[in-house]
Amino acid sequence: MKVGVVGLGAMGAGIAQLCVEAGLETVGREVTAELGEKARGRIEHFLTRKVEKGQIEAFDIGLLSLTTEVADLADCDVVIEAIVEEPAAKQALFVELERVCRADAVLATNTSALSVTEIASATSSPQRIVGMHFFNPAPLMPLVEIVRAELTEDAAFDAAFALGEQLGKHPIRCHDTPGFVVNRVLIPLLNDCVRVLDEARVSPEDLDAGMQHGAGWPMGPCTLLDLVGIDVHLHASEALYDKLREPRMAAPPRLVAMRNAGLLGRKSGRGFYSYDKT
Ligand code: 3HC
């Protein structure tokens, strides 16, 4: 089994890490060699920590090869796309993947809130396109949503489900509805949390403590938004609002102001909280 991962940002690198950990030959594609190397360093760091902590015996980073060429994914059995959440960019990529990959290769998107059916509609083989939606941080979160688009055939769906299991995840089956299962619930809930900041005049620290200690959340909503990325969350929120028109899906002005100011969370060094970027 050979897996391709396109886009080695936080999600793609996490997915590639899971593939290497599962002993699968993995081809990671980034737009520049520098970005690819940065992702490889991150993967090696986290896997080395797992060895040091006795969680795994060993890993073979040699299973991961890097490229800047989509053509190098030609012999992959499954390719997982984790690039920017822009429909046109994803459609263009899937058209290219369809051209270079074997006819029986399964093509998966890790989109958070875009329609898998719409992404697949740009191609002439939508039957082999499926959603594989991982959660941030992908190596730590057990869930993967396996999303059946309108024209996905069983062979592709079942192969994506089996790969999810092989990567040690808990896959669930769902259909291509806005936000699938978890984001349909989580995005408006996080928006509510942000609105409560202003309505209840509570600090991010106290809101986080409230949801951790009063509702059992593993991390508070502001910490979670900083982890996911304010821009990523807003993209998903706007996509859901676009489809469902529910007021709770609409982007909270506080988050829009943060995005405009470049306060994107951990990745930019500052969001609700400040982070050491080194
Ligand atoms: N890859 C690999 N390892 C990582 C990692 C990553 N990306 N990030 C952290 N780790 C490592 C840490 O370095 C740490 O190792 P260390 O001992 O060497 O320091 C180890 O994993 C454990 O880290 P923590 O001590 O921070 O782990 P916790 O037990 O505190 O759990 C958590 C962390 C699993 C993130 C937990 O806080 C949690 O479940 N948070 C909620 C996350 C969540 O809800 N995610 C979903 C977001 S929504 C989404 O993704 C949808 C999308 O479409 C927007």
Image (spheres, helix red, strand yellow):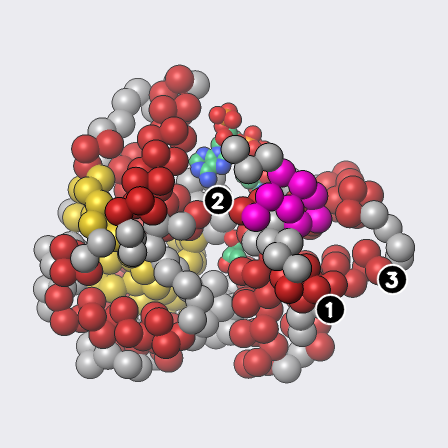
Q: Is residue 12 left or right of residue 182?
A: left
- Residue 228 position in % (x across, y down): 56, 52
Q: Residue at x 20, y 81 (%)?
A: 124
Work out whether residue 150 or residue 15 is closer to the camera in this orientation and state it: 15
Judge depth for marks 2 and 1 and give the one in front. 1
Q: Is residue 254 visible?
A: yes
Q: Which numbered disc, 2 or 3, marks the residue that appears first in the sequence?
A: 2
Q: CA distance from mark 1 to mark 3?
A: 13 Å
Q: Is residue 204 left or right of residue 80?
A: right
* Residue type at numbered disc 2: Pro
- Residue 230 position in % (x across, y down): 60, 57
Q: Which residue is mark 2?
A: 137
Which numbered marker is on residue 253? Answer: 1
Q: Residue at x 49, y 68 (%)?
A: 113
Q: Secondary structure at mark 1?
A: helix
Work out whether residue 15 or residue 163 is closer to the camera in this orientation and state it: 15
Judge depth for marks 1 and 3 and give the one in front. 1
Magenta residues, start to end: 268-275
Q: Which residue is mark 3?
A: 199
Q: Residue at x 14, y 71 (%)?
A: 99
Q: Which numbered disc, 1 or 3, marks the residue that appears first in the sequence?
A: 3
Is 270 colored magenta in this rendering? yes
Q: Which numbered disc, 2 or 1, marks the residue that appears first in the sequence?
A: 2
Residue 254, located in which quarter of the rendered image?
bottom right
Q: Secondary structure at mark 2?
A: loop
Q: Is residue 241 above or below residue 81?
A: below
Residue 23, located in which quarter of the rendered image?
top left
Is disc 2 in contact with disc 3, using a CB cutoff of under 8 Å?
A: no
